[in-house]
Amino acid sequence: ADDLPRVYAVVFWVGLLLRSVVRMIDKAMAPLTSGELHTAQYALYAAIVLFFAYFEGYKGFQKLSAPVFVRRAYELNSSSPWWHKVLAPAFCMGLFHATQNRLHRAWGLVVTVIFFIVMVSFFPEPYRGMVDGGVVVGLGWGAGALPGLYG
């Protein structure tokens, strides 16, 4: 019974990350399959993917967000209020019932992600597709890191 909110939170976020990867993969692959990139643009694409793999995937998800998520998931137990269990995905991300610092970081991340989504939507192709390629790798890394650490 104690595991149910934890599993719910992990499945929710992994599902959300994978859903985003699936929705973005065609746009991310478009620059590579179009045959219109120059050598420098292929190099830029590779650099963007490596950047996102390291900073979003490894540093952001694997080393920072996922360990905090898992630690908070294990705070959920039979004595936790029902709303913490129902809202387990938000609880584990630190979006409520957290220290002031954790709340600022969690909500700051939400605002930052929304800002970058809007900003990148104005990028012309193939550059938007390149950024999408990096994001796909980062989100995929996160989708693997979360259950790997919970595990």
Image (cartoon, rainbow, N blue to C red):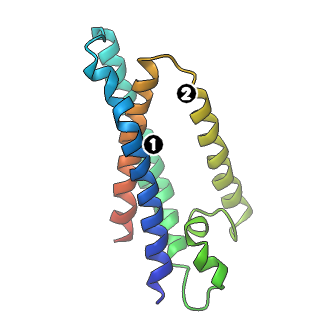
Q: Indicate whether 150 appears above or below 57.
A: below
Residue pictured at 55% horizontal, 79% vertical: 75
Residue pictured at 69% horizontal, 59% vertical: 103
Q: Quadrant of residue 81?
A: bottom right
Inspect this view and state whether residue 53 appears. Answer: no
Position of residue 81 in the picture relative to residue 89 (left or right)? right
Q: Picture coordinates of residue 146 (x, y %)?
A: 40, 61
**Number of the label disc, if any, that sits on residue 120:** 2
**Number of the label disc, if any, that sits on residue 72:** none
Kindly state the secondary structure of the residue where label 1 is placed. helix
Residue pictured at 34% horizontal, 13% vertical: 41
Query: Of label 2 and label 1, which has the lower sequence position?
Result: 1
Q: Picture coordinates of residue 53 (x, y %)?
A: 37, 39
Residue pictured at 69% horizontal, 67% vertical: 96
Residue highlighted by disc 1: 56
The CA span between labels 2 and 1 is 16 Å
Q: Picture coordinates of residue 13 (x, y %)?
A: 47, 60
